[in-house]
Image (cartoon, rainbow, N blue to C red):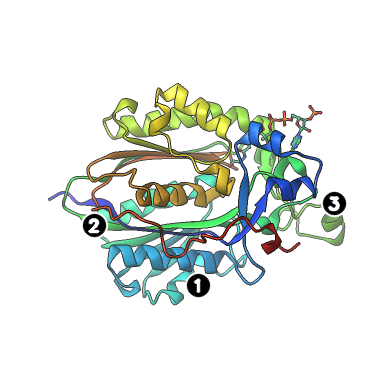
Amino acid sequence: MSRYSAITGWGKYVPEGRLTNADLERMVETSDEWITTRTGIKERRIARPDESASTLCIAAAREALERAEIEGSDLGLIIVATVSQDYKFPSTANLVQHAVGAQCGAFDMQAACSGFIYALSVAHQFITTGAIKHALVIGCEVLSRVMDYTDRGTCVLFGDGAGAVVLSASDEPGGLLGFTLGSDGAKPELLYIPAGGSKEPLTEEGLREGKQWVHMQGGEVFKFATRIMGTAMEEALANAGMSSDEMDLFIPHQANLRIIESASKRLGVPTEKVFVNIERYGNTSAAAVPIALCEAVEQGRVLQGQHIGMVAFGAGLTWAAAVVKWTAPVVSGPTTTTSTKEPASAAVQW
Ligand code: UT7
């Protein structure tokens, strides 16, 4: 009998602190008008000083486990996709494993914004080979800790958050039907943190030069993104034996509304089938796709038997896409760990 890997649980956590375009107008030379028209972003969430990647992951994970109606001890694997882990080592997945009471292997994966779909495809292998029954897959970032809030080219774009899914073995046809992964490491400097690794350990001089922060050549990444989003999604659909008009919902990486619109147009996906929440969270890198998936389910935009296309791109450069047939019965409604507070920029301390 075939084994399939189905999403049986989903959860998210976004910090309460909001950094609005109006806040950014007071910090760098920018405007709400520029940010809105060039990116589609209105505000992003910023973690409190006592929050970190692991606390965000744990909150999202608990919700996903609850939805899947399993305990941490039922898990066979935990993967956290992040570039803003608590420590260089040990992995954030180790911390999550302890917190949720799991007794299984746990590791972090790094494919920048594409990380969640990379991790999902890895968990899928463990499940479909019969090695494990349940995997917890999390995409999480606290990018506010590596942002230069004097660089208007990057600081207006990124935010913090976490999204998690439980992937479970199933005999019912569905779940992850096809995926594709890609990498082009020719120009790492297009989007990177220059120092703090083994190539250039962080020195006082490096700190003065701001080499601990995210550096990006936005225009180059933009051109790459508009090309790769459609191609990658088409590849994953072809691997699933499907075409783009069979997608019921398209969940693209939330990096820039203009990139999303360009990819949707290229794929011929009508606006009503495209999920967008970038205006509220900005680009949360590896967390963007799972947070969007979770919200789409909560909003009743995913029904049993429907096909969801997900695609992401990011530093590396990397890209990844996946097609999932939704098999879980959907109970819509807001999640317990999401803030419902009104915008409160005062919540963000600098
Ligand atoms: O997950 C992957 C992460 N990265 C991305 O997805 C980034 C992809 N790239 C982008 O989204 C866009 O390239 C940006 C939003 C970063 C920039 O938009 P753009 O339309 O490509 O602008 P640009 O870089 O060509 O800059 C146009 C102008 C420049 O001024 P001058 O040289 O024409 O005078 C910039 O200095 O806009 C200026 N600019 C800004 N102005 C106000 C750049 N950032 C800002 C800003 N506010 N925040």
Q: Is the residue marked by circle 1 packed among few (<14), some (14-19), or many (20+) residues within 10 Å? A: some
Q: Earlier in the sequence, mark 2 or mark 3?
A: 2
Q: Label 1: state its secondary structure.
A: helix
Comparing 229 with 65, the one in front is 65
Comparing 224 with 201, the one in front is 224
Q: Residue at x 52, y 64 (%)?
A: 56
Residue linked to disc 1: 95
Inspect this view and state whether residue 180 appears: no
Q: Earlier in the sequence, mark 2 or mark 1?
A: 1
Q: Is residue 227 left or right of residue 31?
A: left
Q: x, y percentage for residue 234?
A: 39, 28
Q: Are marks 2 and 3 in contact (CB under 8 Å)?
A: no
The amino acid beneath tag 2 is Ala
Q: Ligand 1: give its quadrant.
A: top right
Residue linked to disc 3: 209
Residue linked to disc 2: 169
Residue placed farthest to the left in the image? 1
Comparing 321 with 127, the one in front is 321
Q: Label 3: state its secondary structure.
A: loop
Q: Residue at x 27, y 44 (%)?
A: 303
* CA distance for labels 2 and 1: 24 Å
Q: x, y percentage for residue 74?
A: 29, 71
Q: Is the residue marked by circle 2 packed among few (<14), some (14-19), or many (20+) residues within 10 Å? A: many
Inspect this view and state whether residue 164 appears: yes
